[in-house]
Amino acid sequence: MNRLDPSLISGMPPFEGIAPDDLADMLRSARPSRVKEGAAIFGQDEPAQSFFLLLDGRVRVVKTTPDGQQVVMRYIMPGELLGIAQALGRSTYPATALAVMDCLVLVWNGQLWSEFAARWPSFGQNTYKTVGLRLQDAQTQVIEMATEQVERRVAHALLRLAHQSGRKTDNGILIDFPISRQDIAEMTGTTLHTVSRLLTAWEEKGLVGGGRMQVCITDPHGLLLLADGRTGRS
Amino acid sequence: MNRLDPSLISGMPPFEGIAPDDLADMLRSARPSRVKEGAAIFGQDEPAQSFFLLLDGRVRVVKTTPDGQQVVMRYIMPGELLGIAQALGRSTYPATALAVMDCLVLVWNGQLWSEFAARWPSFGQNTYKTVGLRLQDAQTQVIEMATEQVERRVAHALLRLAHQSGRKTDNGILIDFPISRQDIAEMTGTTLHTVSRLLTAWEEKGLVGGGRMQVCITDPHGLLLLADGRTGRS
DNA sequence: CGCGGCTTTGAATGATGTCAAAAATTGTGG
DNA sequence: CCACAATTTTTGACATCATTCAAAGCCGCG
């Protein structure tokens, strides 16, 4: 059997405060898995048989409405757990998880979750803390959708992405995974047309740059002013 | 000292699966408190010193944006915990809780939370389950805001309220606490004007009734059709 | 080189917000 | 019991942001 080294996951938030030997224990029941770009890690409403840790790549979590519209709930970065439906007492996945680029994940059998949480309390606590953070995120998103108009929502979304997954370049902060205008639209509850218009307008103002499936924020500060609405008035 | 009886809280979801003697223990550290209509139970960004159980009345949980706009996050019914910031590792309350009518609450010192959770595992599990439910709620709300237009959002909001707190009357299901068009607007990210127009239109169609600070759903099924968008097309 | 996904752009439409004012309801104090 | 004040609700006219519809351009890949 192919042993996985504790250093793989030590230092990742969910495993904070757990001894290397214990990490090795946890890894013994894990199975590594490669996921091709565009493939699904799990699908909405499927029975939640496993939970996952993203080791490398980027994952987009999407919900689809009964009438087929899609909403991007969040992007997952390496070091984050996903598919933790069991932790919240759910028996099915609430959303679909898609590999935005080739990914490497660890897979555990879902039944292990309660075992892990009982045996290593910090693991449970860490998870619940991130659940708390996700609740906060969702609430901020509700507030943005309720009070901000499209331009500011898109600006906020880009800044959040840059913060999560930005790579500094000569031209500014590059969002370092492929993302389309359609994706941004589905994050912000608008259409790809509106996003496209906004981005070209911002490009003329020198706020952003980009190209096909790519966005780069050239003036983060300027974009932040836009996002927070201190533009134009008084 | 004034003893509180375990029957006060037995049967309430957060205390499911806990023995009466233990309930009595928990109650010994609780302090009952009356809150007048319109008064705040706790305020956004205040240090989270206590957590609460609503015994009677209705509470509106509101977030205020930096520029003063308000968003109603949820209504709390008797039997629900509120102010559980500590459970999620927060040190301040994320929102303001307002008594919609005269309320009776139990108050515990916030530090007791971790003690309770350690001593009575079901209490912790119950709480996390409701946190999971609230995360789901928030996500559904995001999806609604992203994909539905105002009319359907308002319809959904009313149906949800009716489900949580509806009382059957001759004319239909009455939402049995005072609620203004403004409140409904803040739940759905629109303006009181639009809500007013919608309600009068619906009243003409015989879907709802009501009056000042009051809404009654006379045709729940019809409203559900509206909410789910099966109206007019094909 | 041609095809398929992505992106841009224009014009027209429509849903909602904004502004403004009047009407209805409830509570209060005399 | 009435009149007033305060709040809530209704309604109209108008402005506008964003979607929709339509079409063309662009880019990368096979």
Image: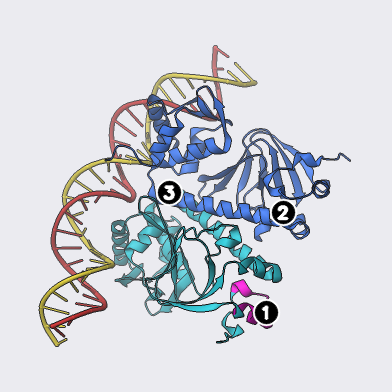
Chain colours: A blue, B cyan, C red, D yellow
Residue B174 vertical placement versus B6 (above, below): above
Q: Main secondary structure of the magenta part?
A: helix
Q: Is residue B17 magenta?
A: yes
Disc 2 chain ID:
A
Tell me whether circle 1 and circle 2 mark residues in contact (CB < 8 Å): no
Q: Quadrant of residue A114?
A: bottom right
Residue A41 appears anywhere in the view: yes
User: Mark 2 — residue?
Assistant: A123
The circle drawn on residue B22 is: 1
Q: Amino acid at mark 1?
A: Asp
Q: Quadrant of the C terminus of chain A?
A: top left
* Camera-side mark, 3 or 2: 2
The segment highlighted magenta reads B13-27
Q: Quadrant of the N terminus of chain A?
A: top right
The 10 Å Cα crowd at callout 2, few under 14, some 14 to 19, many 20 or more, is many
Q: Describe the element under mark 1 as helix, strand or loop.
A: helix
The circle drawn on residue A145 is: 3
